[in-house]
Image (cartoon, helix red, strand yellow):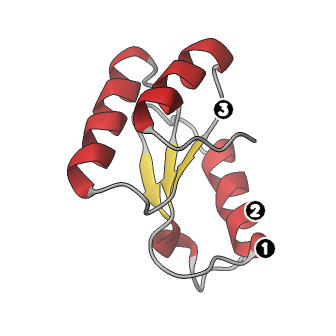
Amino acid sequence: MFRVESLGRAIAMIFSLSPNLVILERTFGERERMAFINCLHESNPDIPVLYLEHGRISPDLLLKACKKILAAQPRVGTVHSIQEFIGKSA
């Protein structure tokens, strides 16, 4: 897992590392986030994105969400919010 402080740096890392999942925190504004996702999916449509909204996220919830996202097929162009997984069983 890597943490970056700018979306430009994140795109550069994605091109060099080809991750299976990208997790976005709420640090960036809506326009930045959408531009990042569009750029990501133009060249890497198979990489899903998980957006962590506000508040603390428990490690168990985060792991459950990542597991479900990575197990889903097809995942082309998928963007998920952590809210989708709150209150759902594994």
Quadrant the C terminus occupies: bottom right
For image coordinates 26% across by 36% down, the residue present is 35
Residue under pointer 2:
63
Instruction: Give the structural element (helix, strand or loop) at label 2.
Output: helix
Crowdedness near tag 1: few (<14), some (14–19) or many (≥20) residues, C-alpha within 10 Å: few
Residue 43 sits above or below residue 75 on the image: above
51 horizontally vs 17: left or right: left
Point out which mark residue 69 bears: none
Q: In this rendering, does residue 90 appear at all?
A: no
- Given the image, on which type of amino acid does mark 3 rest? Asn
For image coordinates 51% across by 64% down, the residue present is 52
Q: Which residue lies furthest to the bottom in this view?
A: 87
Mark 2 and 1 residues: CB-CB less than 8 Å, in contact? yes
Residue 89 sits above or below residue 69 on the image: below
Residue 21 location, quadrant = top right
As measured in the structure, the alpha-carbon distance from the residue carrying label 1 to the one carrying label 3 is 19 Å
Quadrant the N terminus occupies: top right
Residue 37 position in % (x across, y down): 35, 37
Residue 6 position in % (x across, y down): 46, 39
Point out which mark residue 60 bears: 1
Residue 9 sits above or below residue 51 on the image: above
As measured in the structure, the alpha-carbon distance from the residue carrying label 2 to the one carrying label 3 is 14 Å
Q: Of marks 1 and 3, which one's residue comes earlier in the chain?
A: 3
Mark 2 and 3 residues: CB-CB less than 8 Å, in contact? no
Residue under pointer 3:
20
Residue 80 location, quadrant = bottom left
